[in-house]
Amino acid sequence: MVDRRGLGLLTVSHVVDDLYQGAVPALLPFLVLERGYSYAAATGITLAATVLSSVVQPAFGVLADRRPLTWLPAVGLLVAGVGIGLAGLGDSYWWTWAAVALSGLGVAAYHPAAARAARAAAGASAQGMSWFAVGGNAGLALGPVVVTPVLLAYGVAGTPLLALPALVTAAVLLALGRRARARPRSGSASGRTPERDDDWRSFGWLTGLVVIRSVLYFGVSSLVALYVIDRFGVPASAGSAALATFLAVGAVGTLAGGWLADRWGRVPAIRLGYAVAVPGLVLLVVAPSWPVAFAAAVLLGVGLYLPFSVQTTLGQELLPNRVGTASGVTLGLAVSAGGAVTPLFGVLADAHGLAWSLAALLPLPLLALLVSLRLPGPSASARAASPAAGGPRGSPPERAARHR
């Protein structure tokens, strides 16, 4: 049964947490203009926020599996906000770098434990998890919207104001968390009874799929605006609109993925997403006009976001005894893999043009589709058979048959 109140609170907290991820790119232009940072120095701050955060996220996932750290999402959220709040207070580059890195560590601490709690609140529903994922997408989009007016009004020294949403949300999480811990819980509600053995082989294939999607997503989001401007000679606003279209339909794709996963199964929903992404990317590369490119961006956005939350849910089902670890790996690699590889596409664009750089991504959705064929993991029927859904667990052979 879905705990709508708990899931709603976690979704709101996800908005606030990922707002601080979205705040970093919006902060960089002000640092460059006010403090004269080079582009290389600004890139270093981005790496501090993303790669470091993503690398340590699996470690926080392991920690969340070993101990019931119900306070970790609130503390992680608080650290994420305080880090960004401190970023503008020191004049030293390394002060700013360390503050942003601290924020990244807070983001990393938040995700595995919060995703574990969201799974429990959603009753293992993929659609419930998709709402939690949409919260993160909304937070990333809101980052620049919140940061830019504050820094325009107060300059970089105004960053402490940005910590206020984290302070309020973390306080609410801690207060409600204490109240929840005070209630008696049944053994089944604790979620400590293993549903089945961990399927590491299938999780390995899923991890590869997450890496491919990450590279494809970051490649497209980095290139699509510049490509539309360069290819069709349209103003910068049209290029930005193409990127905004790609990102905006992502919310629809994420929710649709959760809805389809609960009805068709996790793996079929994932396969459908990459099947839609293949023609979407091809159409974008060969588009004869910018309206066609916009239509391709819609297809591509739906295709790439449709598997997003479903992959996290599937990972949690493949490792039912290590839900935090599964969340840390799937959510961490979703950022770090693409962020690490994206500069290579920039090098290719400098050498051969944006069209060639975008075309280099063409094999990836097809490769993702092929890798998804190796996934024998749980489908929607597994949800109905799980203790969270109240269905019978059955014998191991019966459960294995239902998962295929």
Image (tube, grey):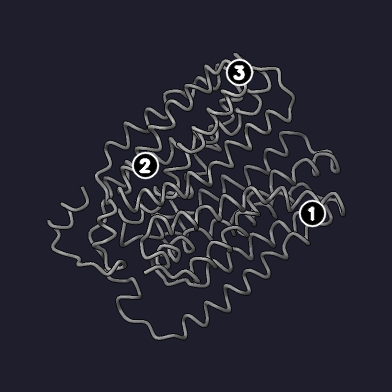
Q: Which of the two labelled residues, at mark 3 and mark 1, occupies the earlier sequence position?
A: 1
| Residue 30 percent coordinates (x, y) | 81, 44
Q: Position of residue 309 (x, y in %)?
A: 44, 50
Circles 3 and 1, Cβ within 8 Å, touching? The answer is no
- Please name the residue that numbered disc 1 is placed on: 88
Q: Secondary structure at mark 3?
A: loop
Q: Earlier in the sequence, mark 1 or mark 2?
A: 1
How packed mark 3 is, by other alpha carbons closer than 10 Å (few <14, some 14-19, many 20 or more), is few
For mark 1, give the secondary structure: loop
Residue 19 tag number = none
Above or below — where is 60 with respect to 52?
A: below
**Residue nearest the observer in this picture, 62 or 141:** 141
Q: Mark 2: give few (<14), some (14-19) or many (20+) Cα within 10 Å.
A: many
Is residue 264 toward the left or the right of residue 347 in the image?
left
Compared to residue 39, the image places residue 316 above or below, namely below
Q: Amino acid at mark 3?
A: Ser
Q: Residues within 10 Å of mark 1 (few under 14, many from 20)?
A: many
The residue pinned by badge 2 equals 270
Using the numbered discs, state the Cα–Cα distance from disc 3 to disc 1 in whole angstroms.
43 Å
Q: Position of residue 269 (x, y in %)?
A: 35, 43
Residue shown at 58%/34% (left/top)?
A: 221
- Image quadrant containing the N terminus: bottom left
Please give the name of the residue rendered at 42% of the width and 24% of the height, measured from the top-left corner.
363
Report x, y in % for residue 205: 32, 41
